[in-house]
Image (tube, grey):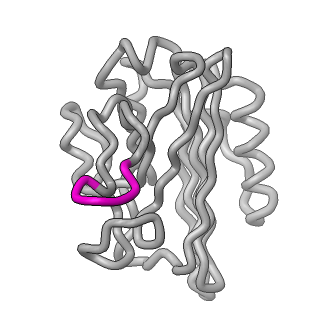
Amino acid sequence: MRVPASLLALMTATAALAGACAGPPAPVQNAKTAQDETVNLNSAGEFGSDDPGAVAYDRKLAPEGAQASVTIESGGGRTRTSLVVEGLLPDRRYGAHLHVKPCGSKPEDSGSHYQHHPGRIDAASEVWLDFTTDAEGAGRSSARNEWPLERAKLPGALVIHAQPTVTSGAEAGQAGARIACLTLP
């Protein structure tokens, strides 16, 4: 599995900042919880048949070779999530959210959006990571939430959606079909 230098650099820098040891290049799946309720989750992979933790559901929107890396740092009452993608369609908007269950063979296997406040559908309760790819199909996104992850209730996956997230109205939180999924540790 090939992991571009930019994804590897992000993963290594984040691990160094979090005080964690850098793991193998990919797929990296590491969960660490300390006494002070600090939680660090990292996962990276190529959406292909060789990695069960990185699943593509739509090869048109997540072509062969597309990759993602997600880093979640939670502590001190806050959570920061960063996403880097490469190899997706160029100059296109995608939605991305944390989901409650790990990826599976079917798009719906990852369950609903992870919500800090159950039943509340907005960017303050959920982790929304919409992004726009550049001319090469690479993109970045980050989210900051004013709540910590709970040890007993960690997200299970990052899901990339076909459309950007609807931010208001009756369809708030919806972002179209699930096109790719990256399991978190």
- Residue ID at (60%, 45%): 83
Whether residue 137 can be seen here: yes
Number of callouts: 0
Q: Determine the image quadrant of residue 37.
A: bottom right
Q: Is residue 87 left or right of residue 163?
A: right
Residue 35's place in the image compared with 88, above or below, is below
Left or right of 9, for residue 66: left
Image location of residue 12, percent across then percent down: 76, 46
Seen at 43% across and 40% down, the residue is 164
Please tell me which residue is depicted at 29% across the width and 25% down the height of the picture: 57
x then y, percent, for residue 132: 58, 33
Could one spot residue 100 in this view of the protein? no
Question: At 43% from the left edge and 79% from the top edge, which residue is drawn?
Answer: 150
Considering depth in this image, is 101 or 123 the residue closer to the camera? 123
Q: Quadrant of residue 159?
A: top left
Residue 93 among magenta residues: no
> In which image quadrant can residue 41 be found?
bottom right
The stretch of residues the image draws in magenta is 166-171
Check the picture and name the quadrant holding the N terminus.
top right
Reply above or below: 16 against 116: above
Q: Is residue 161 left or right of residue 38?
A: left
Q: Which quarter of the image is occupied by the C terminus? A: bottom left
Q: Return the residue nearer the eye: 170 or 173.
A: 170
Chief secondary structure of the magenta portion: loop
Residue 128 lies, in percent from the top left, at 47, 55
- Given residues 11 and 141, the one toward you in this image is 141
